[in-house]
Amino acid sequence: MNDPFLQAHEAFPLFYWMSLPLSPISIRDQMVRGKMIIDRAFENEILVEGQDKGILVVGAGACGVTAAMTAAARNVPTVLIDRGSSAFHLQNGALTRYLDPTQYDWPLDHWQEGNFPWGALPAMPLPYQADIAGNVAAFWNISLNNFLSKHKHGSKLTILWKTEIKNFTLNPSNASVMVKLSQAGGSSYHRDEFGLVIWAAGHGTETCVVESNSKKVVYRGRPFWSIDYLTRPQCGLSVVPEVIIAGGGDGGLQDFLRAITKCESAKEIYKACKIPSEIERVVQSAEDRAHRCYIWGNPENKRHDHAVHLMLQADHSAAVQKALKSKQVRAGLKHLFPNTPDNVRLVYRCSHFENFYGLNRFLVLLIASYLEQVYSMNNILVPNASITDVSSKDGHSCASTMIGGCDGRPHSVELSSYPDCRKGIGGPLRKLDANLIVIRYGIDSANLKLSTRVRSAITRPRHSLPYHVPP
Ligand SMILES: Cc1cc2nc3c(=O)[nH]c(=O)nc-3n(C[C@H](O)[C@H](O)[C@H](O)COP(=O)(O)OP(=O)(O)OC[C@H]3O[C@@H](n4cnc5c(N)ncnc54)[C@H](O)[C@@H]3O)c2cc1C
């Protein structure tokens, strides 16, 4: 087997890994992975149309369902398992979160398409267009059910809910993997033999809580893929909002933009700003330079990423200052902010943001700079800081309140300095008042089952994935 796509995802012979530490991992990336891994397995005769030996796909998210539908459509017996009881569990309930499959590609020429796949590109099992995530997931559920009931090979796909993989044994001599599955909390087990295993069980648990030094949860925020009211007037609160968004990754940046502009999507904000094309070109070059460095950085060595992020942040900041000299950009921003917006701060570690989704990075820097110049809002961005404690100011108990139960209640938020991502947290810094706190600390993949064994097997985790499945 000499296929670079298979090699990049092979954890063990006949066992392919689709989760962290691989990156990038947007939903569209995961669908591209799910489709290509099966296509390439056929091309390399690891799978053969109509074969008897089945394949196992672990995880019924966007990636796993794409892989399972692709394999079953080619007449291969496919078992899709999930420890939950429905597909697309992350997006199903996200009724206020907008999803756009091409937004992350700004400023490339196809970024406004808002469709996946767009134009005459090869079809995908789960196409989607920009919409509220819950609506997109409802459409995917219909696509899956139609496949099961109407596709000529729909019966080749078996879904086992509330089922987990317990362990597996590779058996290269007869090209199979022996898998032990457990159902409904581990009370019953059965063993089965598969010709291939695709691990698409997601990336771990999202961190949306604040923990004290002794690792006790002191504040529980709303998860990213849940309902929130950030785009409503006053962020949905009945009191004057004092909002803190914590986290310099794309989740934090998205929520900052939603809370301060009240727009559902970054595309809507961008349209209003009318950014000149020469600025787009400068940013695209900066993103490209950064990406080329990033994929060769060692994820365990912060020194590499820190340097790349610093360079990218500086390039974006310079482009923002140029953009703010344009009359049309300022007119657009004035239209977006006719009055002083809600008090929303973005608190993040180190002096730079963390991700490579150029649009949100650019818009956050643009808006913060504009509001500083026009409304003298000087503390919107709070770099080099991390939340180390949250305490109630009216006697309610934050950690035991149900999710969202703290919204609108007064809190004191303790910040500690976080001067440098290579060195970690410093000493106490200051306290801020907040009545709405959003924690976007990304995904903790430490508890991913099988991960220790797999991490050492994946040698090139950072990819430059195609924007779509190649024809
Ligand atoms: C804060 C944040 C913001 C994000 N923003 C965006 C965004 O704006 N746009 C975007 O495109 N992407 C975004 N992403 C990324 C996106 O959410 C994920 O990468 C994508 O949902 C992953 O799809 P998946 O199919 O690989 O995994 P998932 O959707 O997580 O599905 C995995 C499935 O596997 C099941 N499972 C887990 N463990 C087991 C097990 N042991 N056995 C059986 N089943 C198991 C789970 O129940 C789940 O159903 C964001 C992620 C985060 C954390």
Image (cartoon, rainbow, N blue to C red):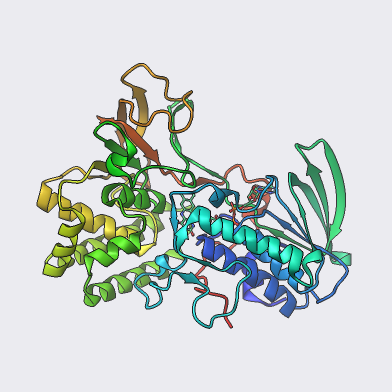
Residue 57 point in image, percent of width and height: 72, 58
Residue located at (56% from left, 50% from top): 92
Residue 127 point in image, percent of width and height: 56, 68
Residue 155 point in image, percent of width and height: 81, 64
Relative to 468, is 165 on the left or the right? Answer: right
Quarter of the C terminus within the rendering: bottom right
Along the line of sight, which residue is nearer the eye, 24 or 410? 410
Along the line of sight, which residue is nearer the eye, 333 or 59? 333
Q: Could you tell me if residue 14 is visible in this image?
A: no
In the displayed structure, would residue 279 be above or below residue 209? below
Relative to 207, is 378 on the left or the right? Answer: left
Hey, which quadrant is residue 61 in on the image?
bottom right
Residue located at (27% from left, 55% from top): 364
Hey, which quadrant is residue 335 in on the image?
bottom left
In the displayed structure, would residue 259 be above or below residue 78? above
In the displayed structure, would residue 233 be above or below residue 175? above
Number of numbered discs visible in the structure rendering: 0
Residue located at (84% from left, 63% from top): 176
Hey, which quadrant is residue 334 in on the image?
bottom left
Along the line of sight, which residue is nearer the eye, 350 or 443? 443
Residue 187 point in image, percent of width and height: 82, 35
Q: Which residue ends up furthest to the top in the rendered image?
A: 395
Q: Could you tell me if residue 167 is visible in this image?
A: yes
Quarter of the N terminus within the rendering: bottom right
Residue located at (37% from left, 75% from top): 108
